[in-house]
Image: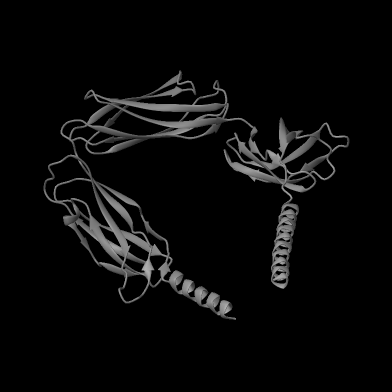
Amino acid sequence: MKYVKRLLCLACFLLVVLSSFVEASMGVSPAKYDVNFEPGFEDDFYFNFHTDNPSQELEIYIWGELGIYITLNKDKIVGSGKVDVHLKLPQKIETPGRHRIFVGARPVVSETSGTVSILASVAAAIDVYVPYPGKYAEIKFEAENANAGEEVPYKLEIYSRGEEAITTNSRIEIFDSRNESVGIYELGTKEIIGVDSVTIRDSLDTITFGAGNYKAVAVVTTDGGQEVKAEDNFKLGELRVRIINYTRELKKNTINPFVIDVESLWNDPVDELYAEVFVLGAEEEISFLTPSAELKPWQRAKLSGYFDTTGLEVGEEVQVRIVLHYGEETTEEVVYLRFVKTVNYFLIVSIIAGAIAVIAFVMWLVVKFKKSEGKSGEENK
């Protein structure tokens, strides 16, 4: 009874300790604003902070070298709330480039609450871009996945970050998995006046490219002699699902879980994917199916089934054929699975218990024999 009471006390103690930790999640939107510097620039921004703990008090903070030019409409919120931010920049900022101001929220922990919060802070940003002297460009580049024979959509953003207008000439070069150039696409010229940007959205003709992994490199040169590069990887898919891994060890005479790891190499969903596993070399035909699954483009997944090895007369390993079915396509792979030796713990425990019993019995006999000898000696005296 005392033992049970001790367990109950320990459980209550752990419950109290664990309840002192409050874990929650936080978020903020929007994540970022971009501002091109102008002398005396002034504007208002807003950020929505939220947490899944409605009673959590949050402190709003500012961080960054330009934070002195920020005014908040409130410095604390409870749970979730909107924070208005007023930015008033000076007439001049000496250092060109990006200056980031963080607007964040962090939990306020009461010293008398008896709780420990492990809630991390969260922050959004206001990026202020101060123009460089003369001509200066920055770029962002994205290329999307596609299927072999299709066009590859891309987006190229060119930013003029200098005080002077720029004229740009752009191209995209494609490299295959061996890093060999397989195509160059000229995009022409663009003129950007002042601190501004242009966006080029189009598609690359890759009809002659086979399925595989590729790298696209965007190169932008300006009339000021600057060359800027940005790259992105993309894939050209084929309607194929490959086997990545599978259960490699089995136990004899039992039902074994069997898992097949697969990966789609297609840029569209793959419907009704399932696996069929055949045992090769057995006297009787043995096979099993897995439930079907749907794969998203380029997704990896697991197909799970059960392999009953009861009565399977084989050696230390068995050969099986794994067949993936999807639409009118199949993927096959012949593999070897190994049988692991199972340990009969009941037999081991029984042997150990028996050995202990025999030893105890022998010791008892020895002790009894010694006592008998002692009594006989006293009687002879």
Q: Position of residue 94 (x, y in %)?
A: 12, 42
Q: Foreground residue, 25 or 215?
A: 25
Quick one: 211 or 160, which is closer to the camera? 211
Quarter of the image for residue 275 reads top right
Instruction: Locate residue 121, reporting x and y percent.
Output: 33, 59
Res. 26 in view: yes
What's the image's color scheme?
one colour
Q: Front-most of 333 and 131?
A: 333
Q: Which residue is situated farthest in the right direction here?
A: 284
Residue 188 lies left or right of residue 44; in this view the side is right
- Residue 204 pos. (x, y %): 47, 27
Which residue is located at x 74 percent, y 55 percent?
A: 346
Q: Is residue 324 visible?
A: no
Q: Quadrant of residue 283?
A: top right
The residue under the point 60% across, 38% down is 268
Does 38 sit above or below residue 70? above
Quarter of the image for the N terminus: give it: bottom right
The residue furthest front is 381
Residue at 51% from the left image edge and 77% from the top image edge? 9
Q: Nearer the viewer, residue 311 or 61?
A: 311
Please determine whether, in this image, residue 16 is positioned above or below residue 165: below
Q: How many marks?
A: 0
Relative to 278, is 39 above or below?
below
* Left or right of 262 in this view: 130: left
